[in-house]
Amino acid sequence: MNTNKVQVFVFAMLFVVGAFTGCVDEDDETTTDNTIKIGFLNPITGPLEPDAPGFKWGADQAISDLSALYPDETFELVELDSGCSGDVAGPAAQTLVDSGVVAVVGAACSGASMAANAVLAAAGIPMISYASTNPGLSDEAQYPHFYRNVPSDAIQGPAGAAMMADAGVTNESLAILHMTNDYGSGLADSIKAAWEENGKLCSAGMQGYEETTTNFDAMVANVTDASDCNAVYLSSYITDGAGILEALAEAGFTGHVFGGDGPAGIGLFDKLTDNATAVNFTVSAPRAGTTYGDFESRYDANAADVGSIKTYVLTAYDATMIIGKAAMTDGTMVAGIESVGTNYEGASGIINFLSNGDIGGNGYDFCTYGGDDAAGTYTCSKFWTAENGVESA
């Protein structure tokens, strides 16, 4: 018999035997990973960096609770930096797709969520943002498989206008200073539209700046040089918000300063040279509904260490829990999220996703900073709802 034919025959027989015995070369061996991977886009760098540890703490707590709830399953949080930027979040989303996540928690910043959605939706992977509020994200055709358990800034506009009117700001005395990114512009436009239902802005009007801006002197001078501008609204994040507050103080501005949820929370004090600079600074932040479970009490017990905006720590926790529970349902993740996200009793309140992935929300807290050089306070004494307007907490 031909020697080559013998070698081929022997090799073929060995291959067949190996197939039946399960013996394969170690280099060809594959294993199945049954771990349920949940992506997490966190602003580890960028303007919301001070809040990132708090957001992560909330998501980590949810992973622990999911593991306790489903002891036969393994849950893993795959955290990547969103950079609070579409340029960072887009590639990060692709990395999450490649890592095999079932869904993604995040992003926080609206522009980051928009870029991430383009990648995730193309891969059929849903996402639940715990902090993105740009009104444009309500467009389900443009942002498919996008959910958020915070309300759109289309609602925060009327809330912010009511906050300022309640504080005694009169028509034609307000200036708006805003970032020109998706969050800053979206909120500023909503505030302006709501404010101008009953009046107009002061002569300094509405001024935009890049989110990386560090010198606000010229913009502030436009406000202080205008005799009719007695109040300022900041559509900002924490770092730039602190910079504008300090610039206004240096310029001798004595009017009332307001803001949205971007700079809200005790983390602002970490960015101020003098805590007293923030005295009487009043902000609006999404109001948590009646809390369910014990997560809020866990946060309260650790608030001094966790920091961040409490509402968004709660929503980060809820978003992670919803995705984990959705992974335990039959069918697609989208169907699971919509099923779990109906009358869901979350730490941030009852969650009901609308057909476009939005929620109606529970109104907005009005919170004011106080204190002195040594200590800072952050007190939420009033709130607003669309049904009842401004009420005392």
Image (cartoon, grey):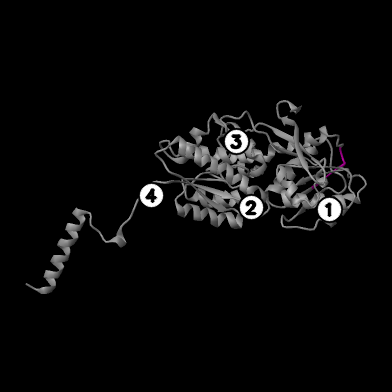
Q: Is mark 2 on a helix, strand or loop?
A: loop
Residue under pointer 4:
33
How crowded pointer 3 is (Cα within 10 Å; few <14, some 14-19, many 20+) is rated as few
Residue 195 in magenta? no
Residue under pointer 3:
298
Q: In which quarter of the image is residue 356?
A: top right
Q: 241 or 266, which lies in front?
A: 266
Which stretch is magenta? 171-176
Which amino acid does the dot numbered 2 rest on? Answer: Cys
Q: How far from the left and from the top, in percent, is residue 98?
A: 46, 55
**Residue 247 bears which disc, if any?**
1
Q: What element carries label 4?
A: loop
Q: 280 or 191, which lies in front?
A: 280
Q: Is mark 3 on a helix, strand or loop?
A: helix
Cα separation, mark 2 vs mark 4, equals 31 Å
Residue under pointer 2:
84
Q: How far from the left and from the top, in percent, is residue 269?
A: 75, 47
How crowded pointer 1 is (Cα within 10 Å; few <14, some 14-19, many 20+) is rated as many
Q: How far from the left and from the top, in percent, is residue 150?
A: 62, 38
